[in-house]
Image: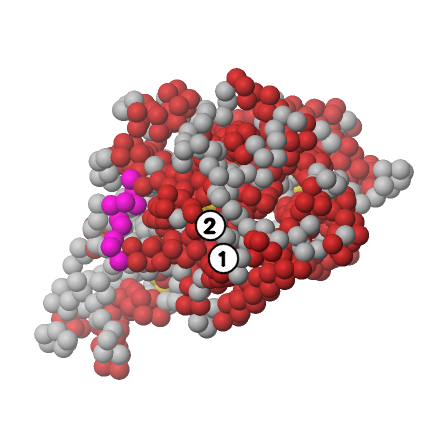
């Protein structure tokens, strides 16, 4: 781009000095362009900031301003000052006209206050566009570390960031429907949506318009989403969402994963039913035939696979054994025992289904990790010791002595009767256990380098080979116990309603156990689902799958209620099984459905081939599972030891001991009781802090309990921070905690210590309530009583960093009388520093007033 047309000398002489200087600067910029050929001489001004103020041009005027030209001389920046912008070598800055709360006249040199700096407009813009590091924040601040654009509200313009003219500056951000707000902050104006929720009000009843429109319907209509009822239906029945996305290339991975899991877990389910639950083996197959099918339709985690687990099967067997002990059922009465198991499964499903209806998905956080680790480790040890009896061929001898005894009784029995073990049974069982453990460890070490080793069905091979050897060498005639005929409860897949009148006598024994099974099952499913996720970040797989704890409760509850009708074992998501599914190619819930189909085919056509399966081999497979439950305990113990988590270790150890030396039910009852007590103690304890000022600063305050030597207290002021919401639970002891801060300046001192903090240092009480994001009526009442007691004693009370005036917290502050009791709204400020200045001001006013009265 060359220079403009030449002018005559008179025109050049008569031109203003500003025009000459501008012309000189243009020459300088042109010469600079030779060295930076990529730099535009005439910046597009796309990123010019528009800050509204009096007399400032509109964004369109700024964007369509005539270009600089030598033929059309323009006034310099000093001739036409722009009070709304400040142009400097560092970039474009909003002028300190107090349009922002961050404006400050002190930042402007005295000679330029009230006007723009006289710096070349074109050069400043081009320099800023080329050299600015953080200009993308669109703050107009010019600082390399600017964060004004992210933390301070900015006025909306007619153009979006980086565009010339755009009408979608407010599109693409979502946000709440402003027309649906009720009279109270955060409330909905429509009672129907408030009571029934968006799903019923919009999806079933069709919703409404105006104030009766929900935010969901508003956003869907605004962004062109037409099939809103299908949207809700696909959310609650996920197969409607993922089935249209399914591709044929997914089928190979899903089928291979389903076949691999079937080879592992079909023999396992037989063992769970016969050895742990004391049921006919076919009832274990029902758990893999029914429950994965239902979960594949309703489940929200694509790669999680449901099925029976050792803890749930063992607890179901406890109920069956109790009824056998009472005489209401017999050891060989498979039909009656299956009906009892169906009652337990149905009740466990009903518990979690009800929890899902009432949106209690947060309950998976009630059971702490130490509690679960202690209980699951105890279950693993109980299962391992239980399986040693049939693995050594001592089942008949134990049936008359310790079949219903505690874990300690069985250990004593094994030690005293080891010489009576059946050699062939013990040899086959121990060999099978050793082979499975060897391949388990080998696959664990090789899988990171050779992922395909996960496809090796080692357990299936062990089961098939042991059955062939038992048939070939007639081991059943040599004392080895085999599975025999897989008895069925009538016809295959026959439905039995578990809550018939004649079955009600079993319900009382099943209620507690079913509740425990549902809690444990849901927690394990929740851990597996959170670990696996929905697969959104993967290159291939399903999209728009929303993981929800409440919908998981609905899916698992429906699956177990349906399974209970077929007298199946309780089935939930398992982390290990789901990892096998993911590692062998399973991408979608179709792997669950294919697993169910394979299990149904096996149940219908392969039952006769299960006859020669040695029971000792099936017990060995369960022993491997029990070992996996125990092997995670040392890792958790080391972790809590390293962080000095003595209370967590004590809780887990207590539950472990009670479960081992007493029984499962009492162990979990003690564990739940202790967990609830810890939760209540944690939620009812106020966590107020006394603040002190960081030396050398005026606006930085820190917890004086953490580093008391490097904190200075403010004379005449007690600064208290409340870092949590205030409810009826944690305000009961708030008064006593404040008294201890008044008396000792710390919460660490024992209440028996006499007062050591002088009374004059408590004349001003400043509450930092930035953490009080919610407040209920009981908490507001206690806070009012606290403020009232201080005001009665003549203590000035200030609040800082209170939530906005549209929040429920501020509404309760006003309606409860706290604002009036403190002395009005001017006692509610934005920072601790401002509150301190206000205390000095009010103290000076009181002194002047008292001096005037004396005169």
Q: Is residue 120 visible?
A: no
- Which SS class for mark 1? helix
Q: Which residues are magenta?
A: 240-250
Q: Residues within 10 Å of mark 2 (few under 14, many from 20)?
A: some
Q: Is residue 307 visible?
A: yes
Residue extending furthest bottom?
A: 35
User: How far from the left and from the top, in percent, is residue 577?
Assistant: 48, 53
User: How far from the left and from the top, in percent, is residue 191?
Assistant: 39, 20
The magenta stretch spans residue 111: no
Q: Earlier in the sequence, mark 1 or mark 2?
A: 1
- Quickly name the residue at label 1: 471
**In the displayed structure image, the side of residue 129 where residue 550 appears, left or right:** right
The magenta stretch spans residue 247: yes
- Quickly name the residue at label 2: 610
Residue 140 picture quarter: bottom left
Question: What residue do we see at 36% from left, 58% from top?
Answer: 256
């Amino acid at each position: 781009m060359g220079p403009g047309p030449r002018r005559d000398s008179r025109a050049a002489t008569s031109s203003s000095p500003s025009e000459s200087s501008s012309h000189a600067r243009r020459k300088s910029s042109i010469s600079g362009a030779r060295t930076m050929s990529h730099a535009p001489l005439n910046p597009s001004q796309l990123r010019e900031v528009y800050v509204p103020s009096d007399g400032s041009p509109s964004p369109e005027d700024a964007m369509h301003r005539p270009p600089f030209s030598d033929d059309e001389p323009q006034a310099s920046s000093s001739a036409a000052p722009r009070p709304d912008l400040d142009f400097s070598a560092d970039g474009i800055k909003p002028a300190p006209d107090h349009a922002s709360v961050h404006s400050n006249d002190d930042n402007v040199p005295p000679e330029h206050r009230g006007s723009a700096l006289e710096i070349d407009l074109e050069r400043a813009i081009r320099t800023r566009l080329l050299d600015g590091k953080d200009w993308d924040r669109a703050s107009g601040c010019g600082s390399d570390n600017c964060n004004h654009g992210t933390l301070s509200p900015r006025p909306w313009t007619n153009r979006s960031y980086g565009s010339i003219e755009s009408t979608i500056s407010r599109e693409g951000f979502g946000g709440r429907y402003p027309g649906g707000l009720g009279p109270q902050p955060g409330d909905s104006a429509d009672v129907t949506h408030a009571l029934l929720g968006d799903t019923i009000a919009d999806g079933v009843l069709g919703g409404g318009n105006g104030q009766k429109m929900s935010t969901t319907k508003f956003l869907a209509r605004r962004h062109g989403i037409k099939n809103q009822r299908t949207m809700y239906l696909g959310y609650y029945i996920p197969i409607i969402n993922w089935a249209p996305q399914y591709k044929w290339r997914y089928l190979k991975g899903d089928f291979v994963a389903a076949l691999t899991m079937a080879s592992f877990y079909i023999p396992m389910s037989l063992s769970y039913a016969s050895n742990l639950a004391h049921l006919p083996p076919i009832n274990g197959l029902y758990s893999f035939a029914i429950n994965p099918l239902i979960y594949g339709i309703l489940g929200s985690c694509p790669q999680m696979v449901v099925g029976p687990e050792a803890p749930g099967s063992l607890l179901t067997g406890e109920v069956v054994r109790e009824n056998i002990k009472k005489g209401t059922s017999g050891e060989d009465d498979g039909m009656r025992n299956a009906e009892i198991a169906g009652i337990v499964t149905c009740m466990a499903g009903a518990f979690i289904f009800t929890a899902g209806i009432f949106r209690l998905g947060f309950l998976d956080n009630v059971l702490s990790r130490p509690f679960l680790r202690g209980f699951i480790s105890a279950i693993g040890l109980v299962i391992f010791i239980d399986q040693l009896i049939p693995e050594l061929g001592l089942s008949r001898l134990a049936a008359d002595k310790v079949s219903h005894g505690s874990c300690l009784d069985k250990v004593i029995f094994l030690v005293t009767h080891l010489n009576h073990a059946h050699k062939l049974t013990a040899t086959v069982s121990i060999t099978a256990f050793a082979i499975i453990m060897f391949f388990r460890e080998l696959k664990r070490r090789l899988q990171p380098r050779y992922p395909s080793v996960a496809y090796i069905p080692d357990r299936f091979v062990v089961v098939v080979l042991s059955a062939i050897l038992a048939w070939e060498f007639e081991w059943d005639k040599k004392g080895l116990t085999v599975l025999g005929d897989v008895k069925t409860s009538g016809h295959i897949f026959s439905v039995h309603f578990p809550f018939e009148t004649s079955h009600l006598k079993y319900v009382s024994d099943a209620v507690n156990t079913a509740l425990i099974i549902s809690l444990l099952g849901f927690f394990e499913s929740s851990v597996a689902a959170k670990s696996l996720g929905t697969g959104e970040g993967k290159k291939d797989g399903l999209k728009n799958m929303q993981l929800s704890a409440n919908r998981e409760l609905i899916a698992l509850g429906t699956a177990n209620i349906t399974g209970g009708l077929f007298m199946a074992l309780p089935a939930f998501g398992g982390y290990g099984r789901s990892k096998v599914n993911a590692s062998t190619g399973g991408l979608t819930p179709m792997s669950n459905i294919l697993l169910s189909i394979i299990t149904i085919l096996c149940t219908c056509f392969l039952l006769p081939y299960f006859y020669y399966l040695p029971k000792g081999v099936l017990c060995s497979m369960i022993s491997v599972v029990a070992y996996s439950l125990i092997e995670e305990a040392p890792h958790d113990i080391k972790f809590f030891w390293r962080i000095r988590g003595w209370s967590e270790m004590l809780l887990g150890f207590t539950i472990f001991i009670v479960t081992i030396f007493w029984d499962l039910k009492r162990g979990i009852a003690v564990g739940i009781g202790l967990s609830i007590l810890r939760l209540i103690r944690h939620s009812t304890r106020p966590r107020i802090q006394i603040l002190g000022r960081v030396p050398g600063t005026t606006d930085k305050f820190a917890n004086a309990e953490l580093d008391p030597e490097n904190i200075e207290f403010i004379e005449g002021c007690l600064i208290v921070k409340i870092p949590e919401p205030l409810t009826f639970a944690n305000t009961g002891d708030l008064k006593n905690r404040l008294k201890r801060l008044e008396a000792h300046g710390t919460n660490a001192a024992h209440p028996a210590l006499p007062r050591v903090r002088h009374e004059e240092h408590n004349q001003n009480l400043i509450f930092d309530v930035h953490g009080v994001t919610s407040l209920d009526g009981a908490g507001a009442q206690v806070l009012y009583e606290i403020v009232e007691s201080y005001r009665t004693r003549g203590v000035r009370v200030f609040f800082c960093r209170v939530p906005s005036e549209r929040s429920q917290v501020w509404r309760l502050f006003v309606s409860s009388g706290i604002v009036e009791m403190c002395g009005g709204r001017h006692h509610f400020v934005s920072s601790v520093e401002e509150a301190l200045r206000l205390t000095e001001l009010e103290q000076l006013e009181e002194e002047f007033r008292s001096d005037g009265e004396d005169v």
